[in-house]
Image (cartoon, rainbow, N blue to C red):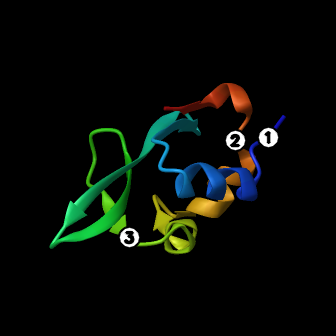
């Protein structure tokens, strides 16, 4: 079964950290505070991260020439870890 965008949105809205494998590379969604604002951080493991404030902004990120929402829609459950 594949992950749906709505399931991903719910997980992010609930504050879950998420790791997944896409095309053989590991990615993560984590959270932090920058300039006193809560942010969502997205990155390939051990690479520069991109910070946004909302899950909708997260879904629109183009990272490694792929849109995050397109990545999410192709993920199999076995390739996703939720914490």
Find numbered disc 1 in the image and state the secondary structure of the residue it sits on: loop
**Could you classify mark 1 by the number of other residues whose Cα lies within 10 Å: few (under 14), some (14-19), or many (20 or more)?**
few
Task: Select label 3 or label 2 by which is in front.
Answer: 3
Q: Which residue is mark 2?
A: 75
The answer to whether the residue labelled 1 contacts the one labelled 2, judged by CB atoms less than 8 Å apart, is yes
Left or right: 14, with 46 as reference point: right
Expressed as whole percent of the image width and height from the top left, the position of residue 43 reads 37, 51
Find numbered disc 3 in the image and state the secondary structure of the residue it sits on: strand
Residue at (19, 67) in percent of width and height: 34
Task: Select label 1 or label 3 by which is in front.
Answer: 3
Residue at (57, 67) in percent of width and height: 59
First along the sequence among labels 3 and 2:
3
* Quadrant in the picture for residue 35: bottom left
Expressed as whole percent of the image width and height from the top left, the position of residue 11 reads 60, 48
Position above or below: 21 against 41: above
Expressed as whole percent of the image width and height from the top left, the position of residue 56 reads 57, 73
First along the sequence among labels 1 and 3:
1
Residues under labels 1 and 2: Cα distance? 5 Å
Residues under labels 1 and 3: Cα distance? 25 Å
First along the sequence among labels 1 and 2:
1
Expressed as whole percent of the image width and height from the top left, the position of residue 62 reads 49, 68
Q: Which residue is mark 3?
A: 52
Q: Nearer the viewer, residue 38 or 23?
A: 38
Find numbered disc 2 in the image and state the secondary structure of the residue it sits on: loop
Q: Which residue is mark 1?
A: 2
**Could you classify mark 2 by the number of other residues whose Cα lies within 10 Å: few (under 14), some (14-19), or many (20 or more)?**
some
Residue at (35, 39) in percent of width and height: 45
**Could you classify mark 3 by the number of other residues whose Cα lies within 10 Å: few (under 14), some (14-19), or many (20 or more)?**
some
């Amino acid at each position: 079964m594949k992950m749906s965008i709505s399931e991903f949105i719910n997980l992010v809205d609930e504050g879950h950290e998420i790791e997944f494998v896409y095309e053989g590379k590991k990615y993560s969604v984590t959270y932090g505070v920058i300039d006193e604002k809560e942010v969502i951080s997205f990155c390939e493991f051990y690479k520069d991260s991109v910070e946004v404030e909302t899950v909708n902004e997260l879904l629109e990120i183009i990272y490694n020439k792929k849109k995050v929402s397109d990545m999410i829609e192709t993920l199999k459950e076995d390739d996703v870890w939720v914490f």
